[in-house]
Amino acid sequence: MSSTKDSVERQYEEIVIEPANRFGINLRELWQYHELFYFFTWRDIKVKYKQTILGILWVMLQPLMMMLVFTFFFRSVVEAENTLGMSYTVFVFSGVLLWTFFTSAVTNSGNSMVLNAPIIKKIYFPRVIIPISSILAALLDLGVTLILFVLYLIIFHVPFDFLSFLVFWPLSLLLSIVGAVGLGCGLSALMVKYRDFRFVIPFALQLAFFLTPIVYPLSQTSQIWFLKYIFALNPMYGAITMFRMPLTSAPVDATLVLISVFSSLLMLVVGIGYFKKTEIYFADLA
Amino acid sequence: MKPIIEVEKVSKKFQIQHQQAAYLSLRDKLSTLFRPATVKEEFWALSDVSFTVQRGESLGIIGRNGAGKSTLLKILSRITPPTQGKITARGRIASLLEVGTGFHQELTGRENIFMNGSILGMRNSEIKARFDEIVDFSGTENFLDTPLKHYSSGMQLRLAFAVAAHLEPEILIVDEVLAVGDGEFQKKCMKKMEDVTDQGRTILFVSHSLPSLKALCKTGLLLNKGHVIKAGAIEDVIDQYTSYQTVTDKITDSIKYYLPYIHVHDVLLNNSNSSSLIVKDSKLHIFVDIEIKKRITFELDVHIKKDEQILASYSNFVRNEVSMYDPGRYQFSYTIDLPSMRSGKYKIDLVFTEPFSSWMGISESSIDLEIINSEHHTFLSNTSLRWGSVLLDGEVSRKP
């Protein structure tokens, strides 16, 4: 590291502080603070499981419980042919896996700005690191459950298309993340000003649970023809559908998946856009 | 060479919402049920603030509470945006607006050092390189792997400052964080800050401690109610600040620490709020408006002093005027007849005491007093002690 004298005289880039809002994401600045992503995520995970005995096992318990409950009670209700050629257990497991990630990612990132208000009021760093760190933490939990899922697939010899897996699993994960980031950032910004969203988020997610093909396929509700397009606006529709593709040979409606992709990209742009627009006022409002 | 910080006409407006609390009638209550009556008030915390800071300068920012110092620091730290104006900074800014930002009680000391350091803008490699120094400075070596919630508040403070002290930004902004901590620790912190200036870095320091400001800073900036009152050499700025303070300010500042359950609303000497008084007619009228929060016995004495010697005093205690006061608001009017005193500069001390408490809180505030006694020979220099300060009245008759 160069001597102090040198570093003091070196020309530094100018930082201009103005009332105007900076709209775009300053990637250079984000890279400067990239270690903070790691620290916030690590802190969230560490604190969550501190002083617990089961620790990381709790991560796997929730999707497992959901899967058991639904398999037990709903298997008779949903007919086997409708679950796209895979066993109902696998159908539910795959859906619940991704949905758990999405719920915790959106809920935690939505609440993250308000929870971190004390830090935001006292120090500067790119604010977007906070909701994204919550999503990264949820991603780690997903990683653990994915391992469990793959083990299940291997142990129970579930038919599996490897090529399809290589293509669609990353895409599905990407879609989930994009949707979560867009919604999470947008909601976290909204929460700072309108605390109502604290109540809206769990309620809306609960509702969305029933409008996503997690425990039953949505093709059963095809009375109104355009309803399926509305369901496709949900980013998790595309994500879960793509996730299931290696496990089934049933045809997939590509249009619906594309609608889902575009919808989540739109959410990303709007969510982050709103966040950036309002972030300089967070310290005043929080 | 371009200045490292240029502040140009910065203003900051806050909107304060007052929620109407008083309901006049049930009807009013019902009508405001669905539309909570809030009155918005605009408050300008800063107005047209402009100044520059050169590289390597150590600037002390002074002002009363509410002058806008913290708001200015927050804007410089990019925590809140200015409403108008522009700031250009040519270097990395690190702010210490609070110690222990980002500290989490469940994490250990070691983990918090990394967390806090990272939030303050240090790279992981920097923290690792300075880890031993930080631990050494804080004196918490034995407790590194215990969760922070088991630390005493003093230890947490030392740890927090230890991390912050090892930042090496071009511009360091410090906001009164040294107000807490014991004397030993404060000395350590001041020394560290002096090192920062010695290394050629720029410091902006906000404090109420005038000795610290004089020791650390070369230049000063005086703010009052959001405006820049003076900028220049630190001694000049401090002088302006102390003369700027009204009597009420001085007494409030001193009583805040020693007798916190007395709130001073107003103090007037001969109907004036100024902290220097000129008396020409031997009459001293003191008006004190205070609010007492706790049931206490207190006395308010008035001392006239010259060169730290008490020449004369009006004492409740001596006059058996000490009473027990219930919580409430009280106004006292003292009318004191001064003896014939030599023209010159004195000091009035207003001393609030709690005579029978175990804590014995005493709050003393000095006001400059100049007595002009036109009856006497103006030839007398007020520094000559030959005739004393009090001149006796009387008459002489002689025969023949």
Image (tube, coloured by chain):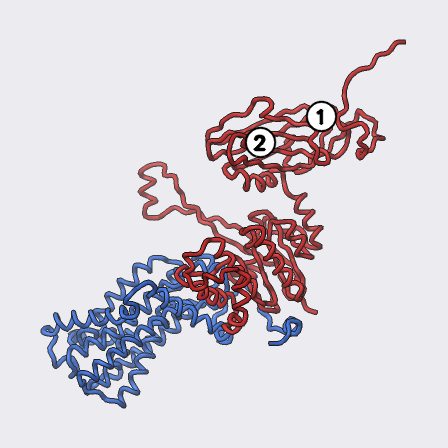
Can you give x and y, in whole percent of width and height, for residue B97 in the image? Answer: 53, 57
Q: Which chain is red?
A: B
Can you give x and y, in whole percent of width and height, for residue A104 in the image? Answer: 30, 68
Letter of the chain that mark 2 sits on in the rendering: B
Is residue B334 rendered to the left or right of residue A36? right
The extreme right residue here reads B400
The extreme top residue here reads B400
Q: Residues within 10 Å of mark 1 (few under 14, many from 20)?
A: some
Colour applied to chain A = blue
Do we see residue A250 in this rendering? no
Tag on residue B313? none
Q: Which residue is mark 1?
A: B282
Q: What is the secondary structure assignment of the residue under circle 2? A: strand
Q: Residue at x 45, y 68 (%)?
A: A276
Under mark 1, the amino acid is: Ser
Can you give x and y, in whole percent of width and height, for residue B190 in the image? Answer: 61, 57
The extreme bottom residue here reads A163
Quadrant of the rendered structure where residue A265 is? bottom left
Can you give x and y, in whole percent of width and height, for residue A272 in the image? Answer: 41, 70
Q: Nearer the viewer, residue B387 or B13?
A: B387
Q: Which residue is mark 2?
A: B288
Is residue A54 rendered to the left or right of residue B156? left
Q: Quadrant of the N terminus of chain B?
A: bottom right
Q: What is the secondary structure assignment of the residue under circle 1? A: loop
Under mark 2, the amino acid is: Val
Letter of the chain that mark 1 sits on in the rendering: B
Is residue B285 rendered to the left or right of residue A253? right
Q: Quadrant of the C terminus of chain B?
A: top right
Do we see residue A79 in this rendering? yes
Quadrant of the rendered structure where residue A14 is? bottom right
Q: Residue at x 36, y 62 (%)?
A: A111
